[in-house]
Structures are given as structure tokens and as C-alpha cells.
Amino acid sequence: MKSKFIWIMCISLAFLLAACSSSPSESKDKTAESQITVSAAASLTDVTKELETAFHKQHKDIDVAFNYGGSGALRQQIEKGAPSDILMSANTKDIDVLENQGKVTDTYDYATNKLVLIKQQGSKLKSVEDLQETDQLALGEVESVPAGKYAKQYLEDHRLWDTVASKIVYAKDVREVLNYVDKGNAQLGFVYQTDLYVGDKQQKGVEKVMDADLQQPITYRMGLVTENQAAKEWMTFMQSDEAKQILKKYHFEV
């Protein structure tokens, strides 16, 4: 009887040890699958908060963390191995570069936007040609911020680049451009149409001068960086009618 009791205890202990040894691994895998990092263009800062809320209602077990910045800077981070499951770019180029490198698989064009020239609220300026000698024009870094590249293209197409080149102050993203103009550190700036709003309300401190007509539309493209199933769920959600309605609410075109 005693030996039978010892044998049963040994078997029970073996099962317990096996369960303990597999538990951390299984827990780690589950955690990895239920967390995603989305690298998102700075112009998506407001809309992604509502997108995440809607997504979480459908996927309560998935946590989404956002890393905001200029699309080019985010692409460079991914190229250097920074953790990211999805890149939501404000252009197509940076996604295409990563796709050509084999660092992005599935892609999806999820929105379009417009470039606008803004001024501080109450300013009398009507165009970049009205800038005085000490005035400044803010735009995103051309190499890393799509809005900056679009702005330069617009100025070159209208033969204004040489006129304003000495007045330009560069920003790390469109949010910084907004801040420069709002605070009066720059008299004019180029941002996206969507940056003029916070949800349904118009941004305070700045106002639109004019639309900057471009030869090609501004297309926002996203790409899957990892094979994380949760990231695939986010990609699928972004193609849903609910996501499109949220994007429209924040003045994106879909």
C-alpha cells in the first residue's frame, strides 16, 4: 500500500512539473500573439485612437500600441530592426521600399488626403509670396516626412521653391508644423487637410489659407511587417466599413 501511494505521488508530481515547465512558454506565445505595435504616420494620431477603440470591442484580447512619427523615419526604424507589426504610412513610397526589401508582405491603400497651406488664426497672409523677409515657412523634413516632400513638389511645380527656400524651417512631422504656426514661430506651414480638425471640431490657433493642388493624389498605404495573427486582424479591420466610416469622420477620404 505504501509503495502504491509513493508511485501515485510520483506520477502526480511529474504531471505538475510538466505543466509548470510548459506554462511560461505557452503564456509567452499567447502574450506575443495578443499584442501588436503599429507604426503610424503622425497625421494619424487622432483617428487611430478611435480606430483602436472600435477594434478592441471586436478583439478584447488584443492590445494595440502605437509608435507615431514621420513615415520615412518609421520606415528607417523598421529597416534597423525596431519592433513593429504594421506600418501605416502617409504615402506609398515607404511601404514600397520595405516591400522590395522583403520586410513587408500584405499592403492596403486605406485612405487619401489633401495638402493645405495654413496660417496662424487671424493672420492676413494669403500665399507664400506674401511672406516678409524675416517670416518663416514650416514644412516637414523632405527626406522623412511625406507632407514635406509633397510641399516641396508643390512649390517647385509653381516655381516658388527658390523664392521661399531661405525662409523654410523644417519640422520632424506635421504635428510640429502645426505647433510652429500656432505659436507664431512660423507664419505659414504645409500640413494635411485632416490636421485642421480634432475629430469633428476644427483645430484652434490655425486656419487654412488654401488647398495645395498636386499632380497626384496623396495616398496612405499600410503594410504587414510580421506574421503576427493579431496584426492580420488589424489589417482586416482597417478594410471594414466601420474603419472607413471612422476615417471619414476625421476628414480622410476612402
Image (cartoon, helix red, strand yellow):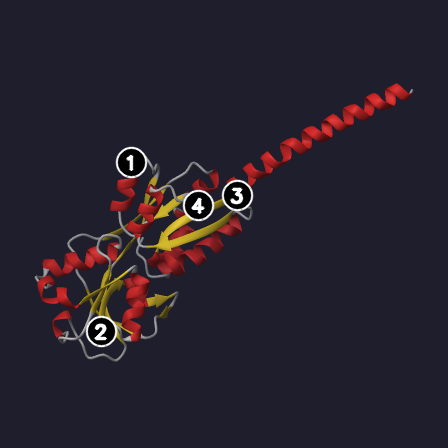
Where is residue 207 shown, x and y percent of the image?
Answer: 27, 73
Q: CA distance from mark 4 to mark 2?
A: 39 Å
What residue sits right under mark 1 in the picture? Answer: 101
From the viewer's perspective, tell me whether residue 143 is left or right of residue 176.
left
Q: Amino acid at mark 3?
A: Ser
The vertical placement of 56 against 30, above or below, is below
What residue sits right under mark 2 in the picture? Answer: 187
Secondary structure type for disc 2: loop
Secondary structure type for disc 3: loop
Tell me the residue at 34%/74% (across/down).
204
Q: Tell which tag, 3 or 2, sits nearer the viewer.
A: 2
Where is residue 224 shown, x and y percent of the image?
Answer: 38, 40
Secondary structure type for disc 4: helix
Q: CA distance from mark 3 to mark 1?
A: 27 Å
What residue sits right under mark 4 in the picture? Answer: 234
Q: Which mark is residue 34?
A: 3
Q: Amino acid at mark 2?
A: Gln
Q: Tell which tag, 3 or 1, sits nearer the viewer.
A: 1
Identify the image quadrant of residue 117. bottom left
Tell me the residue at 55%/46% (across/down).
61
Q: CA distance from mark 4 to mark 3?
A: 11 Å
Q: Which mark is residue 124?
A: none
Where is residue 68 shown, x and y percent of the image?
Answer: 38, 55
Residue situated in front as seen by the camera: 230 or 186 = 186
The vertical placement of 45 against 235, above or below, is below
Q: Are marks 4 and 3 in contact (CB under 8 Å)?
A: no
Where is residue 64 shown, x and y percent of the image?
Answer: 48, 50
Q: Residue placed farthest to the right in the image?
A: 1
Q: Residues within 10 Å of mark 3 (few under 14, many from 20)?
A: some
Mark sitting earlier along the chain (4/2) = 2
